Image (spheres, grey):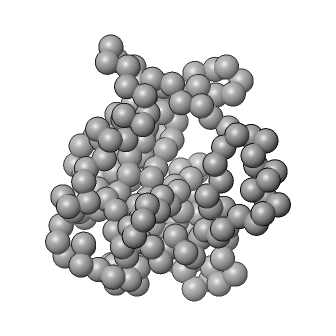
Amino acid sequence: MYKTLVRKNPSTYLIEKLNVRNFAKASEAPQHLQNLQKFSEHEDEVRAALIGNILGDAYVDRRGKKTRLQFLGSIKHKTYLLFLHDFYSTRGYCSKNVPQEFNQLHYSGNTYGSFRFGTYFFTSFNDIHDIFYRQPTDEELSANQKNKRKLRYIKRIPNNINEYLTPRALAFCKALHG
């Protein structure tokens, strides 16, 4: 479990400010991508990367009627995270702004350098949110209140995962932790 700290610079933005500053608006996404309605309409290469990243450390952030993927990793995975950023930004899925380094405070008290970036929000990503996340049960909600964190969704492996797995998706999943 992680708590957020501030970035390594004099302006000391909290991570919430970092999100607002570094994530571009959905309206900046290319129109042809904004028009996609279903996850299956994305290119095969991008679908495989998204599935692999979700099976790995990426998480899906649903806000209202649109969804995005977010990527967070330690400084030791900087090269791979910058590769992912380039992969998605050259295809129009996220801003071309390079992810910024910030410090993250671990519950042990140690501070770690991290990188974070996210895709634009798309309605077509709602499908992958529904595939990989479920609503928590009442029991899970009450148990989680002790942690004082709001539990909105629980990440899961779908029963029909074989429909989504490809060699490329598995490569993206494995690449971060090689």
Query: Is residue 130 in sight in this rendering?
Result: yes
Q: Is residue 88 visible?
A: no
- Image quadrant in which you'd find residue 164: bottom right
Q: Is residue 28 left or right of residue 170?
A: left
Q: Which quarter of the rendered picture does the N terminus lie within?
A: top right
> Within the image, what quadrant is residue 138 found in?
bottom right
Residue 108 image position (x, y, % from top left)? 71, 24
Nearer-the-camera pick, 44 or 111: 111
Q: Is 90 drawn above or below residue 101 in the view shown?
A: below
Count of number-bearing discs? 0
Taking depth in this image into account, of 17 and 78 the one nearest to the observer is 17
112 on left or right of 28: right
With 45 as the anchor, is 107 left or right in this view?
A: right
The residue at the point 81 percent across, 51 percent down is: 143
Q: Which residue occupies 61% across, 68% down?
A: 133
Residue 62 or residue 57, whichever sits in front: 62
x and y, in percent, of residue 107 in the image: 69, 27
Name the residue: 53% across, 50% down.
176
Question: Of 93 and 13, which appears nearest the observer?
Answer: 13
Taking 102 as reference, is 98 above or below it?
Answer: below
Q: Quadrant of residue 55?
A: bottom right
Residue at 66% in and 62% down: 154
Q: Position of residue 98 (x, y in %)?
A: 28, 40
Q: Residue furthest top?
A: 10
Residue 34, image x, y percentages: 24, 72
